Amino acid sequence: MKRVSNIFQTKSNSIYFVNPDASVLDALQIMMDKNISALLVMEGPELKGIFTERDYARKIILQGKSSKETKIKDVMTAKLEVINLNSSIDQCMQIMTDKHIRHLPVIDNGKVTGMISIGDLVKFVIEDQKQTIEQLQNYISG
């Protein structure tokens, strides 16, 4: 069974985060610079939440708040679903589908080790299926 650890073998292990007291504008700047759609919210080594483009659209834009004046801690999602390196790809896909979320923080031995997105899962599944198809074609024609 394929696991999150398999994704981390090829994925960059960079952890992008922002402090809860940072402004939404600061978080958006990081997201733009790194070309990502979600940031972990951390205070030291402690995971406090996540801030996503969806949070921005629903909690800032639609409510007419200022990105410059609003702090991340006031609009982040604090109730998180988390996984670990041993979580299966199927479990991750099930959580994302059931909870309507696109990002899952990865915790290993109580420490944040990264985050996976629905895009990471789809890419991994497609590559895995390609390999399986190639192996089957080689077996049939070999």
Image (cartoon, grey):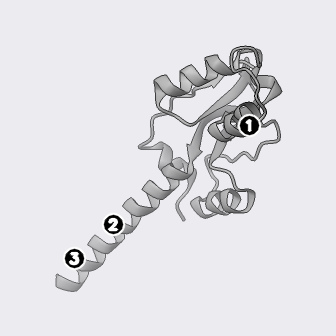
Residue 72 placement: quadrant? top right
Q: Looking at the image, which residue is at 67% across and 62% down?
A: 97
Report the amino acid beneath label 2: Lys
Residue 45 visible somewhere in the drawing: no
Nearest to the eye among marks 1 and 3: give it.
1
Nearer the N terminus, badge 3 or badge 2? 2
Residue at the disc numbered 3 = 138
Question: Marks 3 and 2, Cα distance to the nearest angstrom?
Answer: 12 Å
Closer to the camera in the image, 103 or 127: 103
Q: What secondary structure is found at the residue carrying circle 3?
A: helix
Question: Marks 1 and 2, Cα distance to the nearest angstrom?
Answer: 42 Å
Report the amino acid beneath label 1: Leu
Q: What secondary structure is found at the residue carrying circle 1?
A: loop
Q: What secondary structure is found at the residue carrying circle 2?
A: helix
Image quarter in which the C terminus is found:
bottom left
Nearest to the eye among marks 3 and 2: give it.
2
Q: Position of residue 135 (x, y in %)?
A: 29, 73
Residue at the disc numbered 2 = 130
- Asked whether, in this view, residue 49 is left or right of residue 124, the answer is right
Q: Position of residue 26 (x, y in %)?
A: 62, 16
Residue at the disc numbered 1 = 62
Closer to the camera in the image, 75 or 128: 75
Q: Which mark is residue 109?
A: none
Residue count near mark 3 (Cα–Cα under 10 Å), binned few <14, some 14–19, many ≥20: few
Nearer the N terminus, badge 1 or badge 2? 1
Report the amino acid beneath label 3: Asn
Question: Marks 1 and 3, Cα distance to the nearest angstrom?
Answer: 54 Å
Q: Looking at the image, which residue is at 47% across and 23% down?
A: 33
Image quarter in which the N terminus is found:
bottom right
